[in-house]
């Protein structure tokens, strides 16, 4: 009986990090457009129209910020940021990925895993990021 209680105690200690956040990523919207943020990682099961492996999502108004605490066991974190480009008669969703690389989140498609829990990261979506998304969209159209 004592072995069962000891095993149950060890199991609860081993499982406790999964219930708590491992590392936090905050997105600050410093642009003049509302954006949608999708916190993604392997180990998350959410799916949207545009993305898979979604852990959480939020709309972030200009000047606001939102955070998500990634759970223990998630890997290759990526925050996909999108916004609706209202231009002439069309309104496509434009996207940019911010991924973890060498201690911070930056625009790229090559994500790395966060090396340990207990850290907080943040990055800003700026008007320059919005303009870069629009420029990529306009270039792809022509």
Image (tube, rainbow, N blue to C red):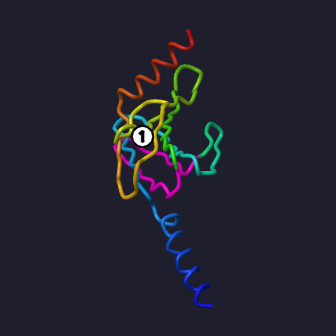
Residue plotted at (48% across, 54% down)? 70
Front residue of 10/48: it is: 10
The picture places residue 132, in percent across and down from the top left corner, at 42, 22
Please state, as top left, top right, bottom left or bottom right, where the C terminus lies in the image. top right
The picture places residue 4, in percent across and down from the top left corner, at 62, 84
In the displayed structure, 31 sits above or below 59; it is: above
Q: Describe the element under mark 1 as helix, strand or loop.
A: strand
In the displayed structure, 68 sits above or below 47; it is: below
Is residue 67 inside the magenta stretch?
A: yes
State the image quarter where residue 124 is shown: top left
State the image quarter where residue 99 is shown: top left
In the displayed structure, 103 sits above or below 133; it is: below
Front residue of 109/135: it is: 109
Q: Residues within 10 Å of mark 1 (few under 14, many from 20)?
A: many
The picture places residue 74, in percent across and down from the top left corner, at 53, 52
Residue plotted at (45% across, 56% down)? 69
Mark 1 lies on residue: 100
Please state, as top left, top right, bottom left or bottom right, where the N terminus lies in the image. bottom right
**Magenta segment:** 54-74
The picture places residue 12, in percent across and down from the top left corner, at 54, 75
Residue plotted at (39% across, 45% down)? 27
In the displayed structure, 54 sits above or below 32; it is: below
State the predominant SS element of the stretch in magenta.
Answer: strand
Q: Is residue 141 left or right of residue 133?
A: right
């Amino acid at each position: 009986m004592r072995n069962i209680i000891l095993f149950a105690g060890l199991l609860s200690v081993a499982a406790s990090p999964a219930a708590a956040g491992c590392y936090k990523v905050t997105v600050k919207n410093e642009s003049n457009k509302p954006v949608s943020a999708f916190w993604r990682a392997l180990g998350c099961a959410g799916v949207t129209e545009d993305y898979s492996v979604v852990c959480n999502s939020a709309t972030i108004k200009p000047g606001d910020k939102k955070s998500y605490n990634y759970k223990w066991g998630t890997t290759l974190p990526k925050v996909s940021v999108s916004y609706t480009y209202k231009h002439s008669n069309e309104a496509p969703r434009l996207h940019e990925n911010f991924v973890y690389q060498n201690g911070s989140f930056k625009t790229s498609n090559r994500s790395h895993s966060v090396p340990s829990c207990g850290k907080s990261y943040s990055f800003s979506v700026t008007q320059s990021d919005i303009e870069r998304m629009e420029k990529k969209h306009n270039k792809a159209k022509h």
